[in-house]
Amino acid sequence: MSSTASARNGTWRNWGGTVAARPAREVAPTSVEELAEAVRRAAEDGLRVKAVGTGHSFTAIAATDGVLIRPQLLTGIREINRADMTVTVEAGTPLKRLNIALAREGLSLTNMGDIMEQTVSGATSTGTHGTGRESASIAAQIKGLELVTADGSLLRCSEKENPEVFAAARIGLGALGIVTAITFAVEPVFLLTAREEPMPLDRVLADFDELWAENEHFEFYWFPHTGSTNTKRNNRSAGPEQPVGRLQGWLEDEFLSNGVFQAANVLGRTVPGTVPTIARLSSRALSARTYTDIPYKVFTSPRRVRFVEMEYAVPRAALVDTLRELRAMVERSGLRISFPVEVRTAPADDIALSTASGRDSAYVAVHMFRATPYREYFTAAEQIFTAHEGRPHWGKLHTRTAEYLAGVYPRFGEFTALRDRLDPDRLFLNDHLRRVLGP
């Protein structure tokens, strides 16, 4: 099965298998003009419009029974501006293709998430991020974007042009219009040295502030039912390049992290009692390693085992308490959790609906193997996250409504007022946006 969403018999399904929709029609425009025409025609026909990328969101943020726009023909680099150090790309360009094309040109994004199957517009519209002490989400690297608004017109925005739209549309949830192109800040390609090593959870929590402060990019995975984590520290390096060997890369990133992990999860789903043992073995399977390579080869990794996910951003200062509460909950619950908990950080940014808007943040992501009951675990985890004023990732499962979100996002009203201006008739509305933004 491909790594993207699928469509069969007129039904669209997302990657995680959590959402299905039957649009009245699908459109794959070959130009911005065709896209604008599709938006105008949908409005005339009384149909709502949503754009969908590769379906990597676990929520129904892109689902519609109206017109589904597929931007897979709107791909490629429009322009590289070496004077401004920017690159402008079509909205349907997958991050994977962008990263490879930039590397060929001797350029790179500053930071990125660990999955690169998403389109640039899908990833930025939902706030996709990696981990970083000073460098923020992919959307925070946007210098300009253009979108087709509800009346079919093309709106360009940047810090100088329509700045109030720019402040919100970088993470627009598909609620303000359909993004057609994005201009990113880039820099000359650089090397990162990654140091991966196991570390006891108690030590990570005790030393977290130090580990965060000493590394440009720090993250860790905690294996529930164990006291073990796998830590990863990425820092800029003068070189030389020392990539992971082909055999070692296959053994650790494919065989263990995908093949054996898939089999272990299937066993755990069938016989839940085996999960704590599997967790202990998983936490010991990956040994320490250090390697140096260009950014996308360090930041990203293949994710072939299907899962469902919830992720919340809590204030960075609340992370240690949040993790301790999560561990205590798992220990007393009787739950069997076969997937590690992922922890990353981001600095405060100035985007209205960014999960790091106005505050230094730490991300805690909980996962369950696809087709395994997850609601009890996610519900209990969500209660912990929301007690710390957590903000859910826009592309991952959560149960929050506009009332809660307005309380944890100081600029929530600014976003909804802009939406009233750009889409007064709610052409881009669906059930999910009605829940998280209000009608």
Image (tube, rainbow, N blue to C red):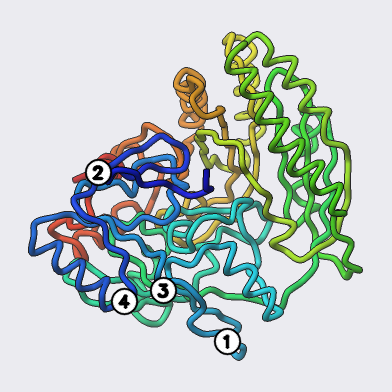
Closest to the camera, between mark 2 and mark 1, is 2
Q: Is residue 365 in view? A: yes
Outermost residue toward the right? 240
The local crowd at label 2, few if under 14, some if 14 to 19, many if 20 or more residues have their Cα within 10 Å, is some
- Find the distance from the CA under tag 3 to the CA under tag 2: 27 Å
In the foreground, 270 or 142: 270
Residue type beneath disc 3: Ala
**Residue count near mark 4 (Cα–Cα under 10 Å), binned few <14, some 14–19, many ≥20:** some
Q: Nearer the viewer, mark 3 or mark 2?
A: 2
Q: Element at badge 3?
A: strand
Q: In this image, 205 relative to 87: left or right?
A: right
Viewer-side label of 3, 4: 4
Residue at the disc numbered 2 = 22
Q: Earlier in the sequence, mark 1 or mark 4?
A: 4
When the figure is inspected, residue 325 is found, relative to residue 121, above or below; the finding is above
Q: Which residue is mark 1?
A: 84
| Disc 2/disc 4 C-alpha distance (Å) | 24 Å
Q: Residue at x 51, y 78 (%)?
A: 77
Element type at mark 1: loop
* Earlier residue among tags 3 and 1: 1
Does label 3 or label 2 sit earlier along the sequence? 2
The kind of residue on which mark 4 rests is Val
Q: Is residue 302 left or right of residue 45?
A: right
Q: In the rendering, which numbered label is found on residue 181? A: 3
Residue 35 is left or right of residue 359, and the answer is left
Q: Position of residue 426 (x, y in %)?
A: 17, 55
Q: Earlier in the sequence, mark 3 or mark 4?
A: 4
